[in-house]
Amino acid sequence: MSKKRAITLMVVLVLVTNIITFGVSNMFSVQLRDKVYVPKKEYEQLVSVYNRYSKVIGLENYVRNNFLREVDEKKLIDGELKGMMQALEDPYSQYMTQEEFKDFIEHTKGIYGGIGVIVTPGDDNLITVVSPIEGTPGERAGIKTGDKIIKVDGTEFTAENMDSAVKIMKGEPKTKVTITILRKGKDGNNEYIDMEIVREEIRLITVKANVIDDNIGYIKITSFDDLTYEDFKKELNKLMNRNVEGIIIDLRNNPGGLLDVCADIADELLGEGVIVYTETRSGEREYLKSNKKQIDTPLVVLVNGGSASASEILAGAIKDHNRGTLIGTKTFGKGVVQRIKQLSDGSGFKLTVSEYFTPNGTNIHGIGIEPDIVIELPEDVEEIGIDNLSKDIQLKKAIETMKEKIK
């Protein structure tokens, strides 16, 4: 760009304020008085900027000058940015303030103070529990997948202000918080349940392993955070050193997490091939692939309605590659991918930028993955896993299926 053209453009940008304040007609008077020549292209850009932002800036000024109370400038701007994301009508895209973004990143690190539940905005505009985290106060209090959190400490919340509700649920360990749950009863009627829960430091132990009947390995993955692959690899090596003949991977109530961590785990289980691929609005695809290394044992994977996102990617890859048998109930059905960005002031956002497909090209968003063997867990079973094997009929079926595979 020439020096003269650059100066002209700078003048044009300065004139934006005049346009917004006085309108297009006054802009012409400014041009004539100051004898500023605006090339047609820059003028059209200027008018476009005016048309796009004049209402926002005008409303901001009106609010500042006329609102009855004192205006918090930061909250005003944050509200505008949150509104921009809400206008997308996508429950997974959101703007986060500096404090909210810090909390979000801490959660992916695996340590925070709170009650231990994973929530998502529901289609009914209610805060919906994806799953309680195993071993946390939320699970012990009886919170279940599908519950709706409608009040926190007596204040009503909807999905639109879910972040505020989550902020209150988090807090210092040994302090109390009251959660009001809306749950569908067995008779189809709504039940309202108040739960007083004592917060704890939630240090997510995301991988637990055991040996069943001396020759079957069992690995439960509760989420995919920064430490999950390292822990998974350690437990997997221990099982292989004990010469197990098959491995059951339990992804029930696993709400997902970091895609790259999920891909690293899939790489240990699959042969060479596609783990998952993503596709943007423009049709641009990105493939995550596994290499030739893999454990040489049969696999059975347990899933349910609380298995979401990265859990579904792992389960879908195993199913499409015929690498193992899926047992349980249909998964949650989150098949979109968010990009996470931090802004210069410490705030940030996550934006849905693509949808993912299983290796066979299946998009499960809003649909979920149907297991190879469907087993419904009785409603009175509140604990699943090794510690409640006598009532966990899904795990029992997994063991039975694995014994058939070993034979």
Image (cartoon, rainbow, N blue to C red):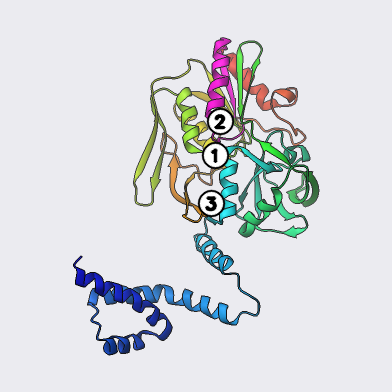
- Name which quarter of the figure residue 139 lies in: top right
Q: Residue at x 70, y 49 (%)?
A: 169
Whether residue 206 is in magenta: the answer is no
Q: Amino acid at mark 1?
A: Gly
Q: Residue at x 47, y 54 (%)?
A: 343
- Name which quarter of the figure residue 293 lies in: top left
Front residue of 85/110: it is 110
**Looking at the image, is mark 3 or mark 1 earlier in the sequence?**
3
Q: Amino acid at mark 3?
A: Tyr
Residue tagged by mark 1?
257
Disc 1 is placed on an element classified as loop
Query: Whole-Å distance between the Cαs marked 2 and 1?
Result: 10 Å
Disc 2 is placed on an element classified as helix
The magenta stretch is 222-250
Front residue of 185/192: it is 192
Q: Residue at x 46, y 42 (%)?
A: 363
Q: Amino acid at mark 2?
A: Thr
Front residue of 97/85: it is 97
Q: Is residue 214 above or below residue 142?
A: above
Q: Is residue 230 left or right of residue 46?
A: right
Mark 1 burial class by Cα count in 10 Å: few <14, some 14-19, many 20+: many
Q: Is residue 307 above or below residue 242?
A: below
Query: Whole-Å distance between the Cαs marked 3 and 1?
Result: 13 Å
- Name which quarter of the figure residue 200 lies in: top right
Residue tagged by mark 2?
228
Q: Which mark is residue 92?
A: 3
Give coordinates of residue 371: x percent, y percent. Answer: 56, 32
Residues at badges 2 and 1 in contact (C-beta under 8 Å)? yes
